[in-house]
Amino acid sequence: MSKLRLAEMDYSVLQQCMHCGMCLPSCPTYNTTGLERNSPRGRIALMRSIADGELELKEAFAEEMNYCLGCLACTSACPAGVEYASLFEASRADIEENRILDTSERRFWRWITIRTLFLHPRLLRLTGRALWIYQNLGLEKLVRASGILKLLPKKLRELEPLAPRIRESFTHELVAESESPPEKPRYRVALLTGCVQDLILSELNRDTADVLLVNGCEVLTLPNQACCGSLHSHNGEEELAKQLARKNIDSYDLENVDAIISNAGGCGSHLKRYAHLLSNDSEYANKAKTWDSKVKDIHEWLCEIGFCPPGPLPVAKQVTYHPSCHLNHGQGVRQQPVEILKAIPNLTLVPLTDADTCCGSAGIYNLTQPEQAGQLQSQKASHIRDTRSDIVATANPGCHLQIQNAVFPKIEVRHPISLLAEAYRNCAISD
């Protein structure tokens, strides 16, 4: 067995947990089972036992770490400031490096996704283009009608209907490499477009660029951006996450941009932790600190610079807001999206019951833990329906898809920035 990251960590991180139990009500898995091992406190106790050599790194521990959503609600609830994200990522890295859950099938799917598609943006886009053809040129209907899907393994049969709808145009076709506002720019920013988001919500990136332009920002958008590495870091591939972090840092002239803008809660949370990820890299440690200081969530940035008041939407709407876990708990960006939604004149914001509870998406959690993810999705959808809103706003592509699959078409799912962009456009038309 290779050396364990948990054993090599600063032991004070493992000792931070006071076992006070303040995290318990915030944890979705503990609320489901009532079992101590399914709580943040219980998981940290397991991690510490492994670091101390009292427990062996075995399948039971690996399964427990995979049952954790990594939603970080516990970090918001914790009075001691426990660094759960660091512990969680170290645990998953130990599990993967020691091949605790290794099977040929699992190895194949991790290779095709984490180690191939999400390391090569052009290949990911090519795959997305092929999927668009499948979905929009009649092949999807033909394949489903033929019954050939019955020949696939059960897991693949269940995944096929959940495949997200791919957009006809990707971000590089909608947003130029450099765009400037009509007046002299007040700021110069780089826009991060995401991986999956580039394929399924490319119009959001166009909306984000438009909102930044209205607010006096020159917008730089690389056409072939690397993945942020969040998927890799959360799934135990620390070295690949570091590789992607270095690639992203090298892609930008950090001294000549005022901010690096992210509009995806999960990506932004990871992007702001490059300094932690590369803390032992003598060449990149200081660069990563500069990077972290520049990364801003779009809502955070707009409220920081003072965004232009929008006009009304074309039609008055009632909206409720689901905060992405990693935007809310990971980045601490809580009030800014609400401020933006409240600023749109004919948009009525309705409170959402248990808004801070995870929707069950959690990266690829809805694929690896479909039962628990389904329970959380159903609870979230029920609370959203109770608001009687026309729209549910959320700021993460995973949340967007998870909620959309439960409430659409009766309730529309939108990003707050897309609503702001629509209000700006409607104001321009009215003028």
Image (cartoon, grey):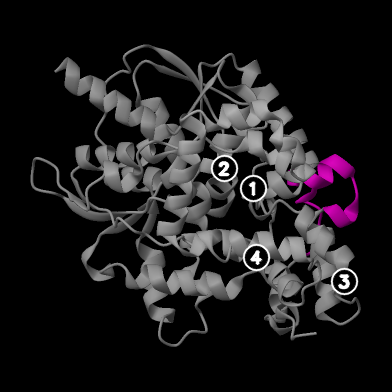
Q: Nearer the viewer, residue 219 or 194?
A: 194
Residue topped by disc 4: 83
- As helix, strand or loop, the secondary structure at mark 3 comes to loop
Q: Amino acid at mark 4?
A: Glu
Q: Earlier in the sequence, mark 1 or mark 4?
A: 4
Q: Which quadrant of the figure contains the N terminus?
A: bottom right
Give the CA distance from mark 3 to mark 2: 30 Å
Magenta segment: does it hold 50? no
Q: Which x, y percent locates residue 6?
A: 73, 77
Q: Earlier in the sequence, mark 1 or mark 2?
A: 1
Q: Amino acid at mark 1?
A: Ala
Residue topped by disc 2: 398
At 26% from the left edge and 44% from the top edge, which residue is drawn? 175
Mark 3 or 4, closer to the camera:
3
Q: Which x, y percent locates residue 234?
A: 63, 61
Q: Is residue 29 left or right of residue 338?
A: right
Q: Residue furthest left?
A: 183
- As helix, strand or loop, the secondary structure at mark 2 comes to helix
- As helix, strand or loop, the secondary structure at mark 4 comes to loop
Q: Nearer the viewer, residue 172 or 92?
A: 172
At 39% from the left edge and 12% from the top edge, which residue is drawn? 316
Numbered badge on residue 362: 1
Q: Which quadrant of the figure contains the C terminus?
A: top left
Give the CA distance from mark 4 to mark 2: 23 Å
Tag 1–tag 2 contact (CB < 8 Å) = yes
Taking 177 as reference, is 154 above or below it? above
Q: Which stretch appears magenta?
A: 18-38
Q: Amino acid at mark 3?
A: Lys
Q: Inspect this view and state whether residue 267 appears.
A: yes
Q: Amino acid at mark 2?
A: Gly
Mark 1 or 4, closer to the camera:
1
Q: Nearer the viewer, residue 356 or 122?
A: 122
